[in-house]
Amino acid sequence: MRAVVLTNYGASSFAPDARRSPVAFLKAAARMRRVNPIKQMWDSKAVVGLMLPTLWDDRQTFGSLLAPLSELIDDGTITPVIDASFPLERAADAHRRLVERRNIGKVVLVSAS
């Protein structure tokens, strides 16, 4: 039996932005869970951090990252939490929901085709 634990941490408060304050950065850092690297090694576990915009700039795709995730969704191992779905014509509303941080879960754009 394969045990899979996926935890998604959003860290948009760490993204470079002229409007971000050092105080907000420190508050967000203080709330992040701490990891003991020796315990991680002993338990054969890993912590991985990704900066998706950097990966996009490098590869112009997320395909290699999404394929294993798609398999876990398809076989029922994980179930994504969908906060809201918007038709493509309302992409601005979906983006606004994200920017205003009103979502709990993923915001999905749905194509009419």
Image: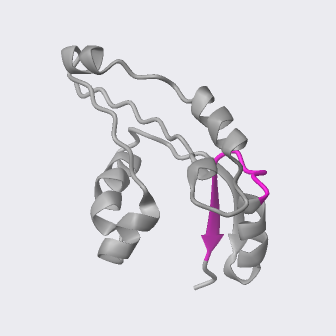
The answer to whether 42 is drawn above or below residue 95 in the figure is above
Looking at the image, which is closer to me, 33 or 79?
33
* Badge count: 0
Q: What stretch is highlighted in magenta?
A: 100-110
| Residue 33 position in % (x across, y down) | 51, 25
Q: Which residue occupies 62% across, 73% down?
A: 110
| Residue 57 position in % (x across, y down) | 38, 74
Looking at the image, which is closer to me, 57 or 1?
57
Looking at the image, which is closer to me, 35 or 73?
35
Image quadrant holding the N terminus, namely top left
Looking at the image, which is closer to me, 43 or 84?
43
| Residue 69 position in % (x across, y down) | 36, 51
Q: Which residue occupies 64% across, 62% down?
A: 17
Image quadrant holding the C terminus, namely bottom right
Magenta region includes residue 103: yes
In the figure, is residue 108 to the left or right of 42?
right
Q: Which residue occupies 71% across, 59% down?
A: 98
Q: Quadrant of residue 86?
A: bottom right
Magenta region includes residue 14: no
Q: Which residue occupies 68% across, 33% down?
A: 27
Q: In which quarter of the image is residue 107?
A: bottom right
In the figure, is residue 51 to the left or right of 99?
left
Q: Quadrant of residue 20?
A: bottom right
| Residue 81 position in % (x across, y down) | 60, 45
